[in-house]
Image (spheres, helix red, strand yellow):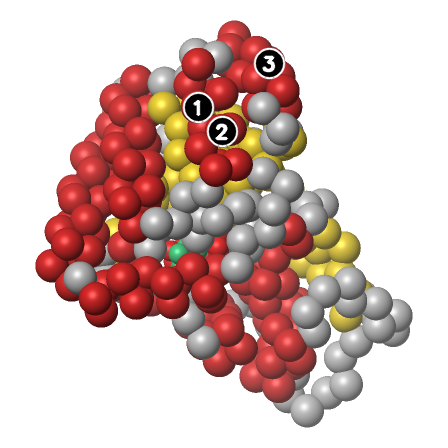
């Protein structure tokens, strides 16, 4: 039997713009999803990703996987990408990461239809990555810490619908939306440098700016705004939604002595503070 685990992810900056070829920054999180090859056919999630992985790399063998996840599929931590990467790695344990990324991204696109692949990159490589769509650039940012706080809205985001909404907006108002994407790309570029310098105060500011652009794109929600402003009032350097928007999680940056206060403020505002560490290891064999 082989057991493989892959981390979940959180988008730090650059969502939506990344779908159109602009860069983003993503971090892998400490909560992991585990795939083991076994006889028990117990898959508590959408089977399509695992079935597609077996079709791609199963060599006609009859694989049965069981899957255990430390995070709920509702959080938007990228369970589809993590399960695809882990299932492929379980079938070919000795594989180079770029080969694994390409195969997993192809499967995710086949099943889902849309997506930049940032979640597949986080599951494969781990750490914190500067990423350009389809893996054109996957650049690890070597950092020791990332003082991140995560709050869940209690609502599941519908990524495909939100991507479509942004596409429609772009269709109607191409210049405005293109300008927003370019502005997001500019702040992602600066954030890359500031993250490497551990200038968290400035990264927090950049997250605030990014949130304003996401609001302009129409992907924020009342609940996200409530949690974001609660975190900021409690002393965060900056806060924003993470991922497609509409629900899922918000993230905030703050010194470690403020973690508890900000977590409580998020809970008082009706969210759920999630205990998760960023910059986690990529896919790995557990046994
Ligand atoms: O919904 P999530 O957390 O998988 O994030 C989606 C982020 C987008 O940029 C909107 C889409 C993508 O694939 O990059």
Residue 281, position as x, y percentages in the image: 53, 43
- How packed mark 1 is, by other alpha carbons closer than 10 Å (few <14, some 14-19, many 20 or more), is some
- How packed mark 3 is, by other alpha carbons closer than 10 Å (few <14, some 14-19, many 20 or more), is few
Residue 110, position as x, y percentages in the image: 48, 80
Residue toward you, 151 or 11: 151
| Mark 2 close to ligand 1, CB under 8 Å | no
Mark 1 vs 3: CB contact within 8 A: no
**In this rendering, position of residue 259 left or right of residue 245:** right
Residue that badge 3 annotates = 260
Mark 2 vs 1: CB contact within 8 A: yes
Residue toward you, 206 or 108: 206
**In this rendering, position of residue 80 left or right of residue 144:** right
Residue 20, position as x, y percentages in the image: 25, 63
The residue drawn where x is 45% and y is 28% is 228
The residue drawn where x is 44% and y is 52% is 244
Residue that badge 1 annotates = 229
The residue drawn where x is 38% and y is 67% is 164
Query: Where does the C terminus fall, quadrant-wise?
Result: bottom right
- The earlier-in-sequence mark between 2 and 3 is 2
Residue toward you, 22 or 98: 22
Residue that badge 2 annotates = 226
Q: Is any part of residue 140 visible from this angle?
A: no
Viewer-nearest of discs 1 and 3: 1
Query: Where does the N terminus fall, quadrant-wise?
Result: bottom right
Q: CA distance from mark 1 to mark 3?
A: 16 Å
The image shows residue 230, relative to residue 279, as above or below, that is: above
Q: CA distance from mark 2 to mark 1?
A: 5 Å
Viewer-nearest of discs 2 and 3: 2
Q: Is any part of residue 262 visible from this angle?
A: yes
Instruction: Give the quarter of the image for residue 177.
Output: bottom left
- The earlier-in-sequence mark between 1 and 3 is 1
């Amino acid at each position: 039997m082989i057991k493989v685990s892959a981390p979940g992810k959180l988008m730090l900056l650059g969502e939506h713009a990344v779908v159109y070829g602009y860069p983003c920054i993503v971090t892998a999180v400490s909560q992991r999803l585990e795939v083991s090859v076994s006889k028990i056919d117990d898959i508590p999630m959408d089977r399509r990703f695992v079935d597609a992985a077996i079709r791609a790399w199963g060599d006609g063998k009859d694989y049965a996987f069981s899957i255990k996840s430390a995070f709920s599929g509702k959080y938007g931590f990228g369970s589809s990408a993590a399960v695809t990467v882990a299932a492929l790695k379980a079938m070919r344990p000795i594989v180079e990461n770029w080969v694994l990324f390409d195969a997993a991204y192809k499967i995710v696109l086949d099943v889902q239809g849309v997506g930049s692949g940032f979640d597949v990159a986080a599951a494969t490589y781990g750490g914190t990555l500067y990423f350009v769509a389809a893996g054109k650039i996957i650049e690890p940012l070597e950092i020791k810490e990332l003082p991140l706080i995560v709050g869940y809205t209690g609502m599941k985001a519908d990524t495909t619908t939100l991507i479509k909404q942004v596409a429609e907006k772009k269709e109607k108002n191409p210049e405005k939306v293109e300008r927003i994407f370019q502005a997001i790309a500019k702040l992602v570029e600066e954030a890359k440098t500031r993250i490497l310098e551990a200038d968290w105060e400035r990264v927090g500011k950049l997250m605030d700016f990014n949130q304003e652009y996401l609001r302009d794109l129409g992907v924020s929600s009342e609940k996200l705004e409530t949690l974001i402003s609660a975190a900021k009032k409690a002393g965060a350097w900056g806060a924003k939604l993470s991922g497609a928007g509409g629900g899922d999680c918000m993230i905030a940056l703050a010194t470690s002595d403020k973690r508890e206060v900000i977590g409580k403020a998020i809970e008082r505002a009706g969210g759920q503070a999630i205990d998760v560490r960023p910059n986690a290891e990529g896919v790995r064999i557990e046994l």
